[in-house]
Image (spheres, helix red, strand yellow):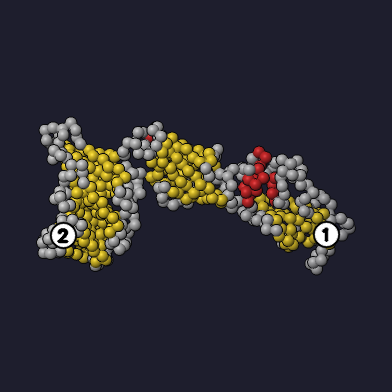
Amino acid sequence: AVAVGSDGNVALTGISNNDAWTVQLAAADGILNWQRRYDAASKSDGARGLGIDANNDIVISAYAQTANFDIYTAKYSGIDGSIIWARTYNSSFNSSDHPWSLVLDSSGNLYITGASYPSSGVLDGMTLKYDGFSGTLQWERRYNGPASKNDEFRSISLDGNGNPVVTGFSTNLDATTDVFTAKLSANTGIPIWEQRYNNGAANKSDFGGATAADSGGRAWVTGYQNNASNIRELLLLKYQPMGSPPLLGGDVAASEAVSSNAEASISMQVEQGDIASFAAGYYDAEGNSSMQISAEIDGQVSAGSNVQLDPEAGRFKWQQDTRMSAPGEHQITLTATDSAGASSGLSITLIINANKPERTWRWQHFGNTAAEGFGAADADPDDDGLSNLSEFAFGLDPNRSSSSDVGTRAEAASDAEAVSGMRAIFQRRKDHQAAGLDYIVEFSSNLRDWTPSNAVPKVLSDDGIIEQVAVNFPPKVPGKVGQFFRIRVEPLAH
């Protein structure tokens, strides 16, 4: 077996002089970095399975002969080949066991498949799972076919959820063999599904030699079948058993979102008023065109949800318009249902952030963040002469006449710097900078000519949302009796 680590170094394992032999070769020039031999009892040993984990440590599985054959599994340091841990498996029947194939999951746990002799003296297909960190055996699963004859697994792969798929052969009563393939639970080893393939037209022996699985759960098996003339023919099988629920998931593409990589649960964030979007693959054994996908938010059908299906490509796209959605955490459930009524679901935790004050204000008062209709900046839904922009800027209610509540007034100033003896009082949003608002205080002595003040407003009070501020009047213009001020609100200059 051969494997390449993320560092580019190449690992090989096999047999050398009846020892299980493992070597690592340098990425640059193929020079030997290190080698490791295993000799159980000066008899026949040989390695068959090989994997490299995220740390570039190397895991092998081998048969090791003492009185019988046992399965030897070891984890070697990718740096120098030193043994991190080693385990020998001898079944409770104390008979021969041997491995054929090994695979690692994303956490470094390893799955080994092969065969084991029970007390009856015929082979059982067998799969083992070891904890990659400690080498502890997590579970073992045997398969004895309906004929109680020889069964053997030759290859193993993992689907997108880390569930192992094994394939090999299972012997019938007439001594012919079928291709046997099973998907096992990664947590327990319990079969999720099992399938036998027999070329019934020829009723000869068929054999599964290799398997591959994809992120959506589909499995492929290659091997051979014997035709009626007993000539071997190449065989390729694809499995998604009939009657199983349609599957959602596969690869994730979430726009304007932060997602966690989990096929059954996704977490994403979006700004209130934006579109949350999620796209992934889907498929159904009876054909994608027979499947429907529905969406709920917090257990209710949402008018803002939209699901688009592409049956030919096997992909769907879900979008949620958050303009009418409250800030905070929401649970989205996508449910796929096929024509037979079988269904499966995908859960999305949608976090709607409220970092844009004007959108939150419109949602609070109009139930929608959109700046259109009654929510437009220049609209005046309460007919009080103040636009929504003014109502927002001064912390007012756009649905209630507020012409007398704007909070502007002139009063005597106690500040020694107020040479005019007066100051202008007004209220503004505390988050005005985040809201993109600029409050320009202008003074005039004739209501025609206005001069903007460069003074920094002084905060007099603050209720957490609205603050009351003051700006001193400028000195009086000689010959003029009156002084006036106004507040002009504009978008903040960038």
Quadrant position of the C terminus in the picture = bottom right
Tell me if residue 313 can be seen. no
- What residue does disc 1 label? 411
Kindly identify the residue that appears in the image at 19 percent across and 49 percent down.
Answer: 124
Kindly identify the residue that appears in the image at 88 percent across and 57 percent down.
Answer: 481
SS category of the residue bearing label 2: strand
Indicate whether 188 appears above or below 324: below
Q: Please tell me in which quadrant of the rendered image residue 428 appears.
A: bottom right
Disc 1 residue crowd, few under 14, some 14–19, many 20+, Cα 10 Å: some
Q: How far is the residue under mark 1 from the one under mark 2?
A: 97 Å
Indicate whether 91 appears above or below 197: below
The type of residue carrying mark 1 is Glu
- Dot 1 or dot 2: first in sequence order is 2
- Residue 474 image position (x, y, % from top left): 80, 61
Indicate whether 346 appears above or below 437: above
Could you say which is closer to the camera, residue 138 or residue 32?
138
- What residue does disc 2 label? 64
SS category of the residue bearing label 1: strand
- Residue 166 image position (x, y, % from top left): 25, 47
Disc 2 residue crowd, few under 14, some 14–19, many 20+, Cα 10 Å: many
Is 468 situated left or right of 271 in this image?
right
